[in-house]
Amino acid sequence: MTDVVVRPYRPQDHSAGRALWVELAETRSGLYGRSAGADPGAGFEEYLTRLDLSGIWVAEDSEGIIGLVGLLMFGTSGEVEPIVVSASRRGAGVGAALLKHVSGEAKKRSLARLTIRPESRNVEALKSLHAAGFDLLSAVELSLDLRSSPSTVDNIEIDLHGLRFRG
């Protein structure tokens, strides 16, 4: 990894943060064969107004901002949301640096637990998060697909306690 610095988000980081949010929205939507919508960056504006937002940090190198991570707080628990690394820099350790930083911030705030909720179809993210120490399965969220036609995206099958689920 080149010289990447993780630092607090500043107002002048807004355009880069919004662009990363768009990448995240498009990646999440693409996992399910859906469009990210007319303005996938609009969610970033809403995110910045969250009352439970405890901090946002960016990863920056000589080329600019290449990653973003946020920490939401709920009493003595924290949630990593979002974490995104620019597609051109994934696999270079930027996400690991962001996760290490946000974990340190959670410890400074004396949080008892830090969770993250990746999409079940994002196998790359699941592997990266597991490698970063997120190996305690704390909740399972199930969905019922109510659309009239099934997704055109190949389903991933997951075994959990002997039960088969689609990802």
Image (tube, grey):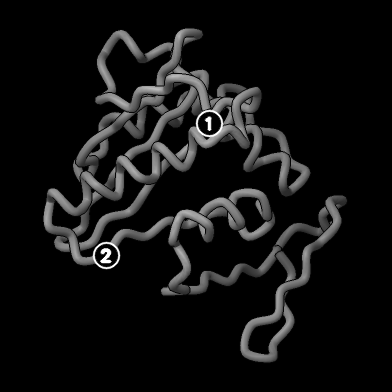
Q: Quadrant of residue 22?
A: top right
Measured as percent of width and height from the top left, residue 97 is found at: 41, 37
Identify the element where label 2 is drawn. Answer: strand
Which residue is labeled 1 in the image?
85
Identify the element where label 1 is drawn. Answer: strand
* Residue at position x 78%, y 64% in the image: 156
Which residue is labeled 2 in the image?
113
| Residue lying farthest to the bottom in this orientation | 162
Q: Which sits in the foreground, 152 or 23?
A: 23
- Identify whether 12 is placed above or below 95: above
Q: Which sits in the foreground, 41 or 134?
A: 134
Q: Which sits in the foreground, 69 or 34?
A: 69
- At label 1, which amino acid type do we have? Val
Q: Is residue 107 left or right of residue 164?
A: left
Q: Quadrant of residue 61?
A: top left
* Residue at position x 72%, y 40% in the image: 30
Measured as percent of width and height from the top left, residue 67 is found at: 46, 27
Q: Quadrant of residue 119?
A: bottom right
Q: Which mark is residue 13?
A: none
- Identify whether 116 is placed above or below 166: above
- At label 2, which amino acid type do we have? Arg
* Residue at position x 50%, y 28% in the image: 21
